[in-house]
Amino acid sequence: QKEVEQDPGPLSVPEGAIVSLNCTYSNSAFQYFMWYRQYSRKGPELLMYTYSSGNKEDGRFTAQVDKSSKYISLFIRDSQPSDSATYLCAPSGAGSYQLTFGKGTKLSVIP
Amino acid sequence: EADIYQTPRYLVIGTGKKITLECSQTMGHDKMYWYQQDPGMELHLIHYSYGVNSTEKGDLSSESTVSRIRTEHFPLTLESARPSHTSQYLCASSSISGRHNEQFFGPGTRLTVL
């Protein structure tokens, strides 16, 4: 079993839709949960992160972590064509300098 | 402007050639990383460094080597390129003081070995 599982998609939605992206993980030591966004032919960039369980909101984006079920979610409200990218979840252990990446979910938002 | 740079962006080369992929960052970060990314696959860590003269191999076995002689520079070398080395190589850096280990990525080098 891989440490981080993420459905690679692709996922195609109409503009304005609510998007739900998810990951599951197996390592109980993970404490920080990051979401990276990667546009085509670019390097990943950090979108947001959460610490331990709970929700974190940043504009149209909400990150959610449920440590009891080892489930990570990213919600995008009012999705825009500019949100079309690959989204990678990347959990990390406390005090660890290494990230474990999921495969990424490729999202296309159709105008 | 603080940033992380990779050159070349694209490289097509023949089998057996020696290549060096360059990575430089101007953020003063202590930690630097090299990842390999194939289409539809996870980023795999192949090398990392926690400071000058410190380098370690990552989770994915790689025939490449790295050096860290200066804080800002972390080049990756392949002594004899093979078609199996065809991939995208991403360099990243992070600050030793960052609790959540936010890593900043360069734009990547897309390597094709014929």
Image (cartoon, coloured by chain):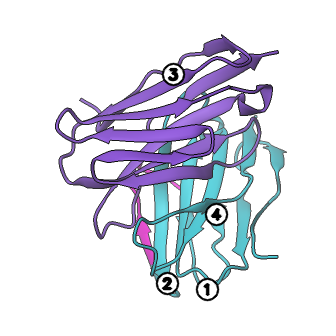
Chain colours: A purple, B cyan
Q: Secondary structure at mark 2?
A: strand
Q: Which of the two residues, A14 or B84, is positioned nearer the viewer here?
A: A14
Which amino acid, by three-letter code, is at mark 2?
A: Gly
Q: State whether discs 2 and 3 lie on one chain.
A: no
Mark 3 vs mark 1, CA separation in Å: 35 Å
Q: Which residue is mark 2?
A: B51
How far across and how far down the image is residue A38, in percent?
A: 66, 41
Q: Chain of mark 4?
A: B
Mark 3 vs mark 4, CA separation in Å: 31 Å
Contact, mark 4 vs mark 2 (Cβ under 8 Å): no
- Nearer to us of marks 3 and 1 is 3
Rendering quarter of residue A51: bottom left
Mark 1 / mark 2, whichever is N-terminal? 2
Whether B59 is among the magenta residues is yes
Contact, mark 2 vs mark 3 (Cβ under 8 Å): no
- Nearer to us of marks 4 and 2 is 2
How far across and how far down the image is residue B10, in percent?
A: 83, 46
Q: Which residue is mark 3?
A: A8
Numbered circle sitting on residue B77: 4
Q: Which of the two residues, B73 or B20, is positioned nearer the viewer here?
A: B73
Contact, mark 1 vs mark 2 (Cβ under 8 Å): yes
Which amino acid, by three-letter code, is at mark 1?
A: Thr
- Nearer to us of marks 2 and 3 is 3
Mark 1 / mark 4, whichever is N-terminal? 1
Which region is colored magenta? Answer: B55-64
Q: Is residue B79 visible?
A: no
Q: Secondary structure at mark 3?
A: loop
Which amino acid, by three-letter code, is at mark 4?
A: Thr
Q: Which residue is mark 1?
A: B71
How far across and how far down the image is residue B78, in percent?
A: 63, 58
Q: Which of the two residues, A42 or B88, is positioned nearer the viewer here?
A: A42
Which amino acid, by three-letter code, is at mark 3?
A: Pro
